[in-house]
Image (cartoon, rainbow, N blue to C red):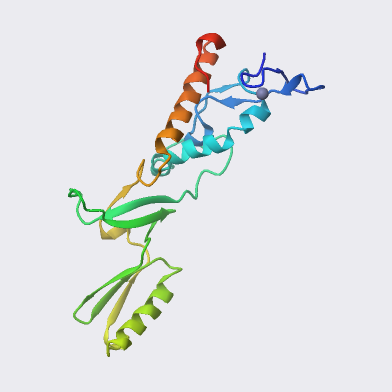
Amino acid sequence: MRCYVCNRKMVDKPTDSSQCKAHGEHIIHNGIRGKLISRAILCEECGGAYRKDDANFCKIFAPFVVALSDRLIPADHGKTDGNMLKGSLFKTPDVKEGDEGIEITAKNGEIIPVQPFDTIEGNKMDVYAGKKRIKDYLNVLTKELADNGDDIANYTIERHTDIHDQGYIAYYFSKGNDNFNEEFKKGMIKIATEYALHCGISRGLSMFY
Ligand SMILES: [Zn+2]
C-alpha cells in the first residue's frame, strides 16, 4: 500500500527512504470525534503535515463539540476540553438586524465579556468583567468617578464575573473567521477524498487535496 501524498510504500518499520511509516488516518477528523480509521491512506509524516489544517477545520466545529461534550464519545487522542469559544450575548432571543450584542468568550461554561462594562441605577452599580480583569476595571471606575467629583463608596456594587445569566448566548460559527471558507473547504475535501480512497475508488478518479 502506498501513501496517497508521497507515494512511498507504507510499512510499520521503514528501512530505507523508499518506504514510509504507516499510520492510522482518521477519515473524519479525530477532533470532531471521527472514528473511521484507515491505515491505507497516508503515512505518518504526510498525515502530520496536515496538522494545522486539521486543527483549523476542527476549531470551526468547536461550538458543537463543546455543547455536546458530555454526550459525545471521547476523541481517540489529544485534549478535548478547554476550548475557548467566541460569541455574542443578546438581551432577547429575537435578535434585531444590526444588534451585535455584547461580545463574549466562553471557557469551561464561564461566560465573560470581552470588554468589561458597568451599569449604574441610582446608587446601585453592576460591574461585568472576568475574574482576572474586574479588579483593574473597578480601579478605573473609582478614578473616573473621583474625576467627576463622585465617590465609588456611594454605590452598592454587584460584581458579575460570569454573565451566562444575563441574556441569550449565540456562539460564532463562521463569524470572526476570515479564512472560514478556505478552512471549511479544505477539511471537507480531505474527508471526501479519504472516504473515496477508503471505499476503493482509485486515485485517478478521486479529487486531489
Ligand atoms: Zn507520505
Residue 164 to residue 126: above or below: above
Horizontal and vertical percent position of residue 146: 32, 88
Horizontal and vertical percent position of residue 89: 29, 55
Horizontal and vertical percent position of residue 144: 33, 82
Name the image quarter holding residue 139.
Answer: bottom left
Residue 198 to residue 115: above or below: above
Name the image quarter holding residue 141.
Answer: bottom left
| 103 and 39: which is toward the camera | 103
Q: Residue at x 27, y 77 (%)?
A: 125
Horizontal and vertical percent position of residue 149: 27, 90
Specify whether residue 125 is in view.
yes
In the drawing, does residue 181 fall left or right of residue 48? Answer: left
Residue 114 to residue 197: above or below: below
Where is ligand 1, by quadrant?
Answer: top right
Name the image quarter holding residue 49.
Answer: top right
Q: Which residue is drawn at 47% across and 24% down?
A: 189
| 18 and 104: which is toward the camera | 18
Q: Most extreme residue toward the bottom, as rendered?
A: 149
Specify whether residue 202 is in view.
no
Tell me the quadrant of the picture where the N terminus can be found. Answer: top right
In the drawing, does residue 139 fall left or right of residue 8? Answer: left
